[in-house]
Image (cartoon, grey):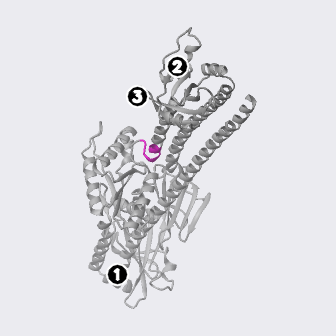
């Protein structure tokens, strides 16, 4: 009988062990898949950011070059230029007047360093640097000048000339009949390109390049060490990610600092220049590493709790084996039952189901239920306790003659204290008087551990959705909530506004005052958001110094007022040993039909960029840009 009992209980134990192993391996695999998915999302976000910045910079550079080209084209409208190109000479008054007019044209574009008037023989006959006629050869665009093309298709040409320290532009000049009579050439200083790329940051280890048609470097952020401009070699893609028309995405190592980055390269319109924006992997994988550390700690905690639960289950299984053995032995012999009652590691009682009185109880049952102890040296007849059994709902089960097998429940004792136990009730057949074996196993410690595990899981869930420094929501949670809010807008037609902002000159602040002071600033921004926004608003830290605020059921102007209050609160905040106030720049946009989270964030990022270009400490919204 004992051998068969052990054989029956060995199978559940084996299932429990293998189930625990499978559960731990499955959770570890889920953690790995989640980390891989997070890494892919961060990589996609980095590529999307690089793509947007490269397009934006390409548009701005093309606009600047186009503006300079229009200025050159306008010189054909000057009467002195027409006279000079037709006759090859001009009076001193005409030369002085032409010089002044060219100076006025240069003032329209400060980055345009000079303008030259070139005749059809490719001779520079007048320059904005002196009020006199000169005769200098100018062969850079001579072929282009005499090429017969549609005026609308080849109106302005551009070429990078390192010796000129800039970009040489040329525009054909025509008379009233549309005939080419010469061209106007100008030089855009390299500082124009360097200033444009310096206005944008792409992380602590990012890179922005402006390249000409020969893949020579025109400008770079951050500025390269002196002497490396000439040694720059074209980017060699290690892996091509995508190519779409004039734009390509690839990963490549930089030959200046050797850092491998994700690049997005865009063409600047019809001009022979390209903009390459690179984001270093170490910049966007930092959050993945932090999440991996947190996930590993969480998995180790779950593994510990699982092993503890397995241990408790195996212990309960052993106790159940003992209970079954005890029941069989009691059925065989009352004397053996008495011995088991006194020696079993369970609280065991023999109860008369008719009178609901306790006949016998072992030491564990006496201690658990606070029954009177057995007096030493008593006779056999005095071993009958005859105490009332007052435990609900066990009394009802006894009266109904039910057989209960290993059921968890909470008991209330006579002193009103509560006790979690596993209860089993087994009638012992036709006996006189009738008896039912009641087995109680104390699981209060296990229940306490389960409550602690539930609290720990809740804390882990909160940690997975919040930023550890500011206690605001993190990017992953904010992206999920933004998607839900957009779905709510599409379903009910509600209003929705988001604000994206980052702290002005935060890197310089960190370099000057230290990372602890920078952390204090981030916490102050989080406190200002918490004190100023509503409970229904969602504030998140989505980058190093970048924040996102989601305003459900809020119009654009109302959200603007809230963000202005945040600016006021932050400007009045003072930090120890810091003599400057902290400001931020931001962009606000509201939901429009067919919007996606990516479209809304892209609009807000563009407004943020415009706010930085406009001088920082500014909030721009969609209405400001119309």
- Dot 1 or dot 2: first in sequence order is 1
Asked if residue 509 lies left or right of residue 137, the reply is left
Q: Which mark is residue 385?
A: 2
- Give the mark toward the camera: 2 or 3: 2
Residue at left offset 38%, top offset 72% = 68
CB contact under 8 Å: marks 1 and 2: no
Q: Name the residue under label 1.
A: 81
- Give the mark toward the camera: 1 or 2: 2
The crowd level at tag 2 (other Cα within 10 Å; few <14, some 14-19, many 20+) is some
The crowd level at tag 3 (other Cα within 10 Å; few <14, some 14-19, many 20+) is few
Front-most of residues 329 and 419: 329
- Dot 2 or dot 3: first in sequence order is 2
- Dot 3 or dot 1: first in sequence order is 1
Q: Where is residue 489 in the image (x, y as percent from the top left)?
A: 38, 65
Q: Is mark 2 on a helix, strand or loop?
A: loop
What are the residue bounds of the magenta stretch? 461-468
The image quarter in which residue 323 lies? top right
Q: Where is residue 597 in the image (x, y as percent from the top left)?
A: 43, 62
Give the spatial CA distance, label 3 vs label 1.
107 Å
Q: Name the residue under label 3.
A: 416
Q: Where is residue 238 in the image (x, y as percent from the top left)?
A: 62, 57
Image quarter in which the C terminus is found: bottom left
Q: What element carries label 3?
A: loop
Q: What element carries label 1?
A: helix
- Give the mark toward the camera: 3 or 1: 3
Residue at left offset 30%, top offset 63% = 556
């Amino acid at each position: 009988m004992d051998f068969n009992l052990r054989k029956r209980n060995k199978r559940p134990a084996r299932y429990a062990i293998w189930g625990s192993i499978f559960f731990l391996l499955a959770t570890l695999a889920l953690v790995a898949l989640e980390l891989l998915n997070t890494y892919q999302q961060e990589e996609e976000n980095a590529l999307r950011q690089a793509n947007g910045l490269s397009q934006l910079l390409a548009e701005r550079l093309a606009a600047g070059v186009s503006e300079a080209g229009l200025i050159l084209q306008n010189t054909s409208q000057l009467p002195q230029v027409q006279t000079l190109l037709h006759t090859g000479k001009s009076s001193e008054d005409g030369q002085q007047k032409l010089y002044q007019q060219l100076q006025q044209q240069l003032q329209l574009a400060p980055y345009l360093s000079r303008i030259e008037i070139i005749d059809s023989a490719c001779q520079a006959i007048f320059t904005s640097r002196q009020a006199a006629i000169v005769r200098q050869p100018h062969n850079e665009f001579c072929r282009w000048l005499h090429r017969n093309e549609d005026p609308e298709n080849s109106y302005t040409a551009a070429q990078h000339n390192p010796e000129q320290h800039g970009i040489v532009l040329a525009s054909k000049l025509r008379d009233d009949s549309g005939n080419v009579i010469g061209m106007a050439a100008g030089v855009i200083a390299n500082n124009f390109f360097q200033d444009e790329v310096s206005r944008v940051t792409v992380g602590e280890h990012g890179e922005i390049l402006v390249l000409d048609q020969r893949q020579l470097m025109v400008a770079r952020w951050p500025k390269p060490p002196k002497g490396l401009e000439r040694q720059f070699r074209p980017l060699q893609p290690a892996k091509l990610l995508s190519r779409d028309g004039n734009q390509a995405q690839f990963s490549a190592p930089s030959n200046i600092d050797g850092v491998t980055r994700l690049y997005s390269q865009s063409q600047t319109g019809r001009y022979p220049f390209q903009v390459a924006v690179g984001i270093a992997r170490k910049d966007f994988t930092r959050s993945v590493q932090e999440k991996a550390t947190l996930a590993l700690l969480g998995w180790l905690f779950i593994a510990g709790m699982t092993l503890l639960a397995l241990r408790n289950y195996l212990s309960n299984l052993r106790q159940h084996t003992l209970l079954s053995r005890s029941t069989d032995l009691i059925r065989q012999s009352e004397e053996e039952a008495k011995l088991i009652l006194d020696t079993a590691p369970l609280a065991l009682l023999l109860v008369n189901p008719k009178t609901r009185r306790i006949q016998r109880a072992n030491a564990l049952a006496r201690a658990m239920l606070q029954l009177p102890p057995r007096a030493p040296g008593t006779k056999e007849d005095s071993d009958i306790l005859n105490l009332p059994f007052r435990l609900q709902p066990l009394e009802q089960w006894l009266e109904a003659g039910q057989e209960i097998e290993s059921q968890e429940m909470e008991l209330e004792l006579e002193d009103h204290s509560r006790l979690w136990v596993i209860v089993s009730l087994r009638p012992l057949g036709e006996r006189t008087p009738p008896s039912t074996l009641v087995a109680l196993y104390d699981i209060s410690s296990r229940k306490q551990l389960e409550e602690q595990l539930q609290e720990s899981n809740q804390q882990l869930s909160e940690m997975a959705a919040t930023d550890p420094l500011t206690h605001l929501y993190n990017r992953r949670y904010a992206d999920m909530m933004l998607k839900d809010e957009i779905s709510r807008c599409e379903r009910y037609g509600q209003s929705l506004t988001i604000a994206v902002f980052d702290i002005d000159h935060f890197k310089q602040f960190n370099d000057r005052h230290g990372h602890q002071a920078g952390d204090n600033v981030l916490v102050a921004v989080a406190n200002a958001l918490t004190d100023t926004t509503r409970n229904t608003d969602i504030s998140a830290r989505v980058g190093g110094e970048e924040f996102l605020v989601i305003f459900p059921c809020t119009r654009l102007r109302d959200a603007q007022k809230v963000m202005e209050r945040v600016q006021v609160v932050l400007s009045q905040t003072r930090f120890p040993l810091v003599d400057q106030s902290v400001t931020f720049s931001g962009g606000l946009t509201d939901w429009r039909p067919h919007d996606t989270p990516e479209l809304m964030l892209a609009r807000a990022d563009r407004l943020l960029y415009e706010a930085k270009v406009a001088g920082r400490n500014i909030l721009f919204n969609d209405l400001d840009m119309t």
